[in-house]
Image (cartoon, grey):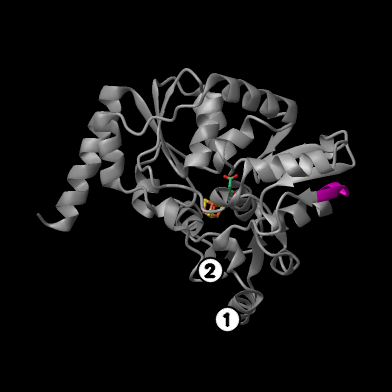
């Protein structure tokens, strides 16, 4: 079959199955263009999961990585949440271990633990507070402690310290998002030389030397909103490059350039049209979270104020 027909048929099948199952498709801003095109809602993890609460559908198809689909389930416990590909696992979350978190907590008994959403489910059932990239400053700032044990990316640990003025102790010096960690200052300076008028916008997972060059630091949704409102017409985007598709589509009169051509998250791209179709057809892979973890994680989210 001609490729165009194949894709058109797949999209039609997805649409029909979506209606039959009474489902909504959520897609993270790092998803492939064709997945962004079929999504009912696009966004960062907090936008997607909070919007899903307001949508009266039985099933959520979560196009993103496993650890973000967990948040959708925690906030929508009565709905069925489907992750279309079991291999869509955040590489950074795979570097995190509950035993390292417990060790840090023992070493700093007066601390509170702050966890980033991209983390294993058993850790979400253990912590005091949970944050996404969109609300770090607020959540960290509201914590009634001077010492935060930070259970995630070391570059974000620096960012949390800068934003909150608190002592931030990462549970391991080795945890990074490989996609943002490989985005070098050399790459960024090359992009700046090619696009002299462009403003740099960066994600908090970037190295501090990249963040220092940025006009604005925000989650992917924050970057999109900033570009919509700004009087500037050209931007260099320092994050995973899936976001550029959405920026170009929703803001066609402005120009967007990647800070690095190689900032691509493979697990995010594991979700394909075929996987979404199969997911709706076979009701797989359902996100299941033990009740005690789900309750504890929801409590941490409520205490965090989102
Ligand atoms: O969309 C973002 O900013 C990322 C990468 C994480 C999140 O919080 O969804
Ligand atoms: Fe995980 Fe990094 Fe991919 Fe985000 S970009 S899903 S933090 S590996």
Q: Image height check: is 219 above or below 297?
A: below
Q: Image height check: is 41 above or below 75?
A: below
Q: Nearer the viewer, residue 90 or 62?
A: 90
Query: Are the residues flagged by discs 2 and 1 in contact, CB closer than 8 Å?
Result: yes
- Left or right side of 195 for 32: left
Crowding near the residue tagged with mark 1, few <14, some 14–19, many ≥20 C-alpha atoms within 10 Å: few
Quadrant where the image shows the N terminus: bottom left
**Residue 246 coordinates in the image, percent (x, y):** 47, 53
Residue behind mark 1? 194
Find numbered disc 2 in the image and state the secondary structure of the residue it sits on. Answer: strand
**Residue 61 coordinates in the image, percent (x, y):** 39, 34
What number of labels is visible? 2
Image mark for residue 257 = 2
**Residue 131 coordinates in the image, percent (x, y):** 68, 39
Residue 234 seen in this snapshot: no
- Give the extent of the magenta segment: 163-168
């Amino acid at each position: 079959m001609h490729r165009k027909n194949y894709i058109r048929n797949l999209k039609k099948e997805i649409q029909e199955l979506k209606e039959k199952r009474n489902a909504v498709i959520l897609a993270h801003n790092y998803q492939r263009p064709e997945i962004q095109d079929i999504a009912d809602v696009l966004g960062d993890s907090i936008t997607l999961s909070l919007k899903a609460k307001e949508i009266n559908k039985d099933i959520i198809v979560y196009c993103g990585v496993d650890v973000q689909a967990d948040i959708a389930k925690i906030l929508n416990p009565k709905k069925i949440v489907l992750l279309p590909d079991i291999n869509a696992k955040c590489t950074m979350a795979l570097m995190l271990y509950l035993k390292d978190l417990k060790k840090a907590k023992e070493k700093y008994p007066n601390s509170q633990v702050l966890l980033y959403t991209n983390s294993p489910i058993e850790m979400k059932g253990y912590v005091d507070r949970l944050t996404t990239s969109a609300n770090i400053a607020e959540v960290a700032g509201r914590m009634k402690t001077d010492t935060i044990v930070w259970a995630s990316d070391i570059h974000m640990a620096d960012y949390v310290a800068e934003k909150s003025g608190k002592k931030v102790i990462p549970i391991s010096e080795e945890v990074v998002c490989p996609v943002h960690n490989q985005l070098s200052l050399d790459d960024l300076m090359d992009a700046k030389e090619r696009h002299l008028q462009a403003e740099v916008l960066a994600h908090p997972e970037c190295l501090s030397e990249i963040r220092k060059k940025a006009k604005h630091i925000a989650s992917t949704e924050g970057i999109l909103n900033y570009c919509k409102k700004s009087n500037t017409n050209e931007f260099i985007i320092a994050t995973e490059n899936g976001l550029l598709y959405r920026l170009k589509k929703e803001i066609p009169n402005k120009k967007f350039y990647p800070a690095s051509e190689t900032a691509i998250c493979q697990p995010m791209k594991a979700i394909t049209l075929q996987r979404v179709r199969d997911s709706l057809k076979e009701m797989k892979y359902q996100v299941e979270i033990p009740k005690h973890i789900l309750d504890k994680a929801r409590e941490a989210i409520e205490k965090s104020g989102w």
